[in-house]
Amino acid sequence: MNIPTLPQTARALLAHTAESTLIPCPTQSLPNVERLKELTGLLKIILFPGFFGNACADEKAMTACLDRLYSLLDEQIYSGLCFAGREPSPALLSAAHTQAFISRLPAIKRLLATDVKAVKDCDPAATGYGEVIFCYPAIQAMLHYRVAHELLRIGVPLLPRIITELAHAITGIDIHPGAQIGDYFSIDHGTGVVIGETCIIGNHVRLYQGVTLGAKGFVLDSDGLPINLPRHPIIEDNVIIYSNSTILGRITIGHDSIIGGNIWQVYSVPPHSRIVQKKATTTAFIDGLGI
């Protein structure tokens, strides 16, 4: 058997093929996932002072946390801009993006406080706001989403998707950073929830595990590639969607509606709708025969 040497294997791995040219090797430094994990951990300390790590209970301690955050974020935004390759002066733009994001932290904190209250108020099993902050996967997912969404709004490439995917890996909740989600948003349990890029979700909306807010199909360009158009649902205020329901396409679920469990919904419904399954049918089987 002719076993290739390590240098031969290395050359083969680095060689360009017809397929590999579609995935070029980046020439610039990439965002660092471990640094981004540190960054999101630091944001937990900053946005929920007193709950995680350094208490940040006084102005001096909070300023020190923000200084570290600035350094980490500026570095990672710079790498993201270099990777995207669209900016002639990534160093100047990364500093501007970092300053803009940090100025928005009080607004992010306010939104997260509404999410904590919504989760606590919708779950009689929760013993208090502290338990919700410490233990509930929805809050971790929403912290990552709220941060990533603001970065995306500012114009930061790549980082928002990495940050939401870090939460997805931990919680099983998949929220695209491009989705628009209002105040007082709650997810109960959370595993398997999917919220697509162009979703618009109002205030006081509650989802249960396994809910999909997805696309029904794609519009293709002349090359057969999907065009990024609005394709996900609009969920108006005060809507509840129960477990394992799938809502697809650019449809609207009117305010104050309830979507029951295990529903497949591809048409808009007016406000105050109640969408439930048909009544279950009981069938007797003989000699063990059946489904």
Image (spheres, rainbow, N blue to C red):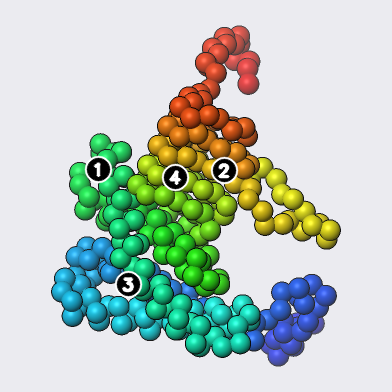
Frontmost residue, 130 versus 10: 130
Question: Which callout, 2 or 1, points at the residue further toward the start of the chain?
Answer: 1
Helix, strand or loop for disc 2: loop
Looking at the image, residue 196 sits to the left or right of residue 18; the answer is: left
At 72% from the left and 57% from the top, the residue drawn is 227
Residue 36 occupies quadrant? bottom left
Q: In this view, does 192 lie above or below 45?
A: above
At 54% from the left and 12% from the top, the residue drawn is 282
Frontmost residue, 4 versus 252: 252
Helix, strand or loop for disc 3: helix
> x%, y% of residue 147?
41, 64
Helix, strand or loop for disc 1: loop
Residue with the mark numbered 2? 233
At 60% from the left and 39% from the top, the residue drawn is 251
Q: Residues within 10 Å of mark 4 (few under 14, many from 20)?
A: some
Amino acid type, label 2: Pro
Q: How crowded is mark 3: few (under 14 residues within 10 Å), some or many (20 or more)?
A: many
Question: Which callout, 4 or 1, points at the residue further toward the start of the chain?
Answer: 1
Residue with the mark numbered 3? 42
